[in-house]
Image: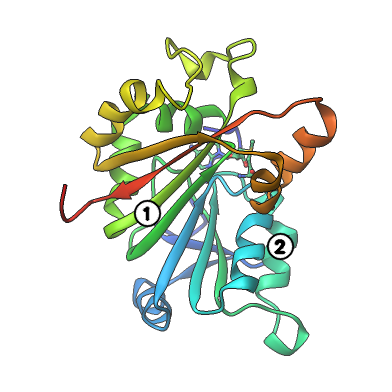
Amino acid sequence: MPSSTPAALPGSTPAALRRVTGKQVVEVDEGAFADLRGRYSGAVLDVGTGDGKHPLHLAKAHPELLVIGLDAAKDNMRKAATRASAAPKKGGLPNLLYLWAAAEQLPRGLDGITELHVLMPWGSLLRGVLGSDPAMLAGLAGVCAPDATFLISLNLHAWRPPVPEVGTHAEPTPESAVEDLGPALKAAGWHLDSAAYLDAEAIAALATSWTRRLNSSRDQLDVLALTGRINPSAG
Ligand SMILES: C[S@@+](CC[C@H](N)C(=O)[O-])C[C@H]1O[C@@H](n2cnc3c(N)ncnc32)[C@H](O)[C@@H]1O
């Protein structure tokens, strides 16, 4: 977990829904979140959102979806959160919110997620999605609706040379990922359907700051996308 893991706000319980609205953090009532969720046909949760550019991009493109960026570090989300929570006539996006929480300790009331994204994870989030933290994977599956889809994009430079978080996992390839990572994901309700390298266009389409930063600083950026279903109702 990053060093700025959420600490309890005065008067709040540790797992309350904490919405970052800019410099402010406000607690969202579980009922208010359920009402908000009910207004949209689906909900995307971007875990480890960083500066939140990816959900901002999605929320603009998909006004029919509720889009949620979540990160254990709140300060990087401030700018996007200020924009999202502005009045709609001033460019605010009513379908976008940012939550301050660790993937290991998801807020009470977070529910009904139909699409889960984990893009360019590092630290405990990377360890978790590689299967070393089954409780984290199960917790994330617990906030998802049946047949939610997932997208994990792995920055393969984490293996070149290997960072401690990758543990004993060899660098995954489209051929090895399903066999190497599939069983641990499946045990937590995540069914890995496919693994594929992303080309430069697909990486750019994710609209995340990390892919942009890495793209500009390296000759080659290798990203492996893992996709599948969470809590599948069949198969
Ligand atoms: C390399 S950045 C990627 C940010 C963003 N997804 C992007 O592609 O631009 C990894 C992010 O994961 C967050 N993170 C790491 N461990 C986490 C955890 N356990 N729970 C929630 N967020 C976490 C970090 O705070 C950081 O913002």
Left-right relation of 179 to 28: left
Q: Is residue 103 visible?
A: yes
Residue 122 coordinates in the image, percent (x, y): 57, 30
Residue that carries the numbered disc 1 in the rendered image: 149
Q: Is residue 73 left or right of residue 232?
A: right
In the rendered structure, which disc, 2 or 1, sits on the residue that comes first in sequence?
2
Residue at 84%, 35% in the rendered image: 216
Q: Is residue 96 left or right of residue 217?
A: left
Q: Give x and y (percent) for residue 235.
A: 16, 47
Q: Residue at x 15, y 53 (%)?
A: 234
Q: CA distance from mark 2 to mark 1?
A: 25 Å
The percent coordinates of residue 193 (x first, y second) are: 34, 41
Q: Nearer the viewer, residue 129 or 219?
A: 219
Tell me what residue is drawn at x 60 percent, y 60 percent: 55
Up-down relation of residue 142 to residue 160 (above or below):
below
Residue 109's disc is none
Quadrant position of residue 233 = bottom left
Q: In front of the other: label 2 or label 1?
A: 1
Query: Which quarter is ligand 1 in?
Result: top right
Asked if marks 2 and 1 touch (Cβ < 8 Å), the reply is no
